[in-house]
Amino acid sequence: MFGLDMAQFNDIATLAALVAACVGVLKGLATGTPYEALAGRLAPLVAVLVAAVFVLVPAEIREKIIVISVVSLTASGAYTFTKKRTDVPGPNTSENEKGGGTNGGGTNDTR
């Protein structure tokens, strides 16, 4: 495949996943702000810049950047999944607060 052995392909796939995750975090930071549309438009440019950093720096520095990226992205993902969510009804929430009140409608959206 393009003259790459499997190890090189795996390295490229790993870097692509890291670049996508970094861009996703940056876009997530802009969500709900006036800069959300701008972040979406600049995402491809940010992806190229992040990829350039991964590819153009010397190997010793690249390895450290990859470790820093993996640890920080893992930590931010773990925080996202463990922080208390206020939009999800808990076990002590009354039926009216869950959306199942007298209107007969409501949803059980647990995003």
Image (tube, rainbow, N blue to C red):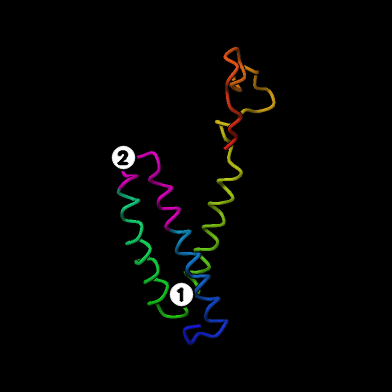
Q: At which x and y percent is residue 43?
A: 36, 57
Q: Which residue is mark 2?
A: 34
Residue drawn at the location 39% of the way across and 66% of the way down: 50
Crowding near pointer 1: few (<14 within 10 Å), some, many (20+)?
some
Q: Which residues are magenta?
A: 23-37
Residue drawn at the location 57% of the way across and 38% of the way down: 111
Q: At which x and y percent is residue 102?
A: 60, 12
- Asked which secondary structure carries label 2, the reply is loop
Front position among marks 1 and 2 = 2
Residue 27 colored in magenta in the image: yes
Q: Amino acid at mark 1?
A: Arg
- The disc, 1 or 2, on the residue closer to the chain's N-terminal end is 2
Residue 32 colored in magenta in the image: yes
- Asked which secondary structure carries label 1, the reply is helix
Q: Is 94 on the left or on the right of 16, as rendered?
A: right
**Mark on residue 62?**
1
Determine which quarter of the picture holds residue 46: bottom left
Q: At which x and y percent is residue 56?
A: 37, 77
